[in-house]
Image (cartoon, helix red, strand yellow):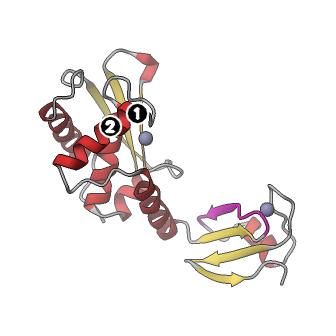
Amino acid sequence: MSMYTTENRVRTEVMQDVAILIDLGIKGVEDNKYTIKINNRLYRVLGRCSKPNNVEKRYTIELSGKFATNASDQSVRNTIMHEVIHSAPGCMNHGKTWQSICNLVMSKYKEFNLSRVSHYDEYSKALAKTAPYEVICANCHTSSKFMRKTKTIDYCLRGRAKCGKCGSKMLDIYYKGTIIKQGGK
Ligand SMILES: [Zn+2]
Ligand SMILES: [Zn+2]
C-alpha cells in the first residue's frame, strides 16, 4: 500500500513535482492551479490529467484509487510526475515536448522512472492484484480483465463464450496469473 491514499497527500506531491519542474527551468507551470481527485472508478489508467472546460492554467489530476492503494510509493510518484508533466505548456499528449521534460526529470532526479512501458507494467501488476480474472483469446491475444467471477467468466469456463474481436472460442482463462482453463479444451 502506498502513502498516496488521500487527496491531500497527492496534492503535496503534485506541488513538489511542480517545484522540481521549476527547478529544471520549465516555464509556465508556476501559476498552475490543480484539482486533485482520487478516483475509485479509474481502472484503465493509473492517472489522468485533464483541463476542465479548457480554462487557462487549471488542471485536474486524478489518480486511480486501486492503483494508489496497491502500488509502491515510487510507482505512484512516477505516475503523479507523469501527470504533472502533462500540465506543462504543450504537453497534453505524449509528444516530443512531454517526452523531453520526462527525460530531463529522469536525468536529474534518478529516482523517477517515467518510461511509458514501466508505467503500463506497473499498471498491469496493480490490476492483476485487483482484477483476478483474465480471459485471453488464444487466437488474437485480446485480453479482458474481470473483478469477479462474472457470467462471462462462467460462459468461458463452460466453453460457450466467443472472443468479442475475432469470434474464436479458444479462450484461455487465468485466475491471479495462473491458467485455469485452456482455450478449446
Ligand atoms: Zn500520460
Ligand atoms: Zn480473438
Residue type marked 1: Lys
Residue type marked 2: Ser
Please provide percent x and percent y for residue 149: 66, 71
Q: Residues within 10 Å of mark 2 (few under 14, many from 20)?
A: few
- Ligand 2, seen in the image, is in the quarter at bottom right
Q: Quadrant of residue 101?
A: top left
> Please, what secondary structure does the residue beneath circle 1 have?
helix
**Is 127 covered by the magenta stretch?**
no
In the rendered view, tell whether residue 30 sits above or below residue 184: above
Is the C terminus in the top left, top right, bottom left or bottom right quadrant?
bottom right
Marks 1 and 2 close (CB-CB < 8 Å): yes
Tell me if I can see residue 130 in this picture: yes
The residue positioned farthest toward the top in the image shown:
56
Q: What residue is disc 2 on? A: 100
Q: CA distance from mark 1 to mark 2?
A: 6 Å
In the rendered view, tell whether residue 25 sits above or below residue 119: above
Residue depicted at 71% across the width and 64% down the height = 141
What range is drawn magenta here?
139-147
Residue depicted at 45% across the width and 18% down the height = 53
The CB of the residue at mark 2 lies under 8 Å from ligand 1: no
Q: Quadrant of residue 144?
A: bottom right
Q: What residue is disc 1 on? A: 96
> Please, what secondary structure does the residue beneath circle 2 have?
helix
Please provide percent x and percent y for residue 87: 33, 29
